Image: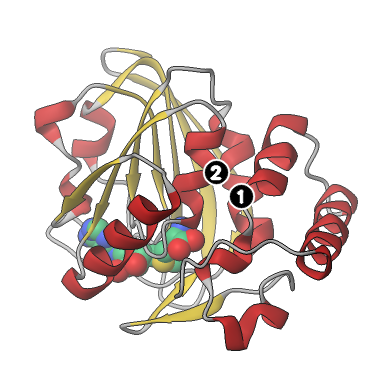
Amino acid sequence: MAYKSIDNYREKGARKRLIELLRKKGIEDENVLNAMWEVPRHFFFDETFWNQAYKDIAFPIGEGQTISQPYTVAYQSQLLHINKGDKVLEIGTGSGYQTCILLKLGAKVYTIERQQALYERTVDGLTRLGYKPHFFLGDGSKGIPGHAPYDKIIVTAGAPTVPDVLLQQLKIGGILVIPVGDENSQQMVTILKVGEHDYEKVVLDTFRFVPLVGDKAW
Ligand code: SAM
């Protein structure tokens, strides 16, 4: 991950084509598509791999982790229905690409990563690019209770179950988006908190994420 901010015509063209592909695959939220235009994904790749940045694929970022597939980032972002000023907890900072999309959508982002090397690299890279989420190092499967409640919570790694602590940290009217399943595949789950102890759950499409590792996870 280089976080080198040169955006030339070749990368811009490839990004435009990727956005058209996401549209064809069913992403309809223009704010999300616009944010994906405004955050050049190749900034999150070493220059040697810039030719991979606008393929609709996940890609290794070191420490056995991946930058999520663009379609997955768009899909989860769309499900969050971000309003400007929303306080969003992101669990699994990774490369910080999804973090930047949330910031472009106008969210105040609290993002947590458990792997120290990845955390340090991403804090440094995003800071150099001028993005300013609140960064945390630690086990996000427990949420970040000290800053709760949140309008929205997004989990970018696959969980075995929905951790109760995350539901407790949602505001009423808030949304949790989390992939739930086994190590091979997970279904995207959205949970709307309609009352202090009342939730509406919707189970959506199947994805494949790296595991959410932690006290309330694998
Ligand atoms: N959206 C990120 C991106 O585009 O780069 C995706 C990151 S990757 C698919 C998932 C991340 O979750 C990994 O960096 C992994 O280390 C992290 N992770 C896994 N379990 C975690 C936990 N309990 N707390 C915080 N981060 C966790």
Residue 218 visible from this viewpoint: no
Mark 2 element type: helix
- Ligand 1 picture quarter: bottom left
**Image quarter (top left, top right, bottom left or bottom right) of the C terminus:** bottom left
Relative depth, front residue between 64 and 101: 101
Horizontal side, residue 30 vs residue 115: left or right:
right
Name above or below for residue 135 compared with residue 103: below
Relative depth, front residue between 189 and 76: 76
| N-term mark: 1 or 2 | 1
Name the disc covering residue 101, or none. 2
**Circle 1 is placed at which residue position?**
39
Residue 92 visible from this viewpoint: yes
Query: Measured from the top left, where is residue 113 in percent x and y?
Result: 25, 59
Query: Measured from the top left, where is residue 5 in percent x and y?
Result: 56, 61
Name the disc covering residue 90, or none. none
Residue type at numbered disc 1:
Val
Query: At 37% across and 61% down in the image, what residue appears?
Result: 125
Query: Measured from the top left, where is residue 204 in percent x and y?
Result: 62, 47
Residue type at numbered disc 2:
Ile
Query: At 76% across and 67% down in the image, what residue appears?
Result: 11
Q: Residues within 10 Å of mark 2 (few under 14, many from 20)?
A: many
- Disc 1 vs disc 2: Cβ atoms closer than 8 Å? yes
Find residue 58 and report its image quarter. Answer: bottom right
Horizontal side, residue 95 vs residue 136: left or right:
right
Horizontal side, residue 205 vs residue 178: left or right:
right
**For the residues marked 1 and 2, what is the alpha-carbon distance in whole angstroms?**
7 Å
Query: At 88% across and 60% down in the image, what residue appears?
Result: 17
Name above or below for residue 91 compared with residue 55: above
Total count of labels: 2
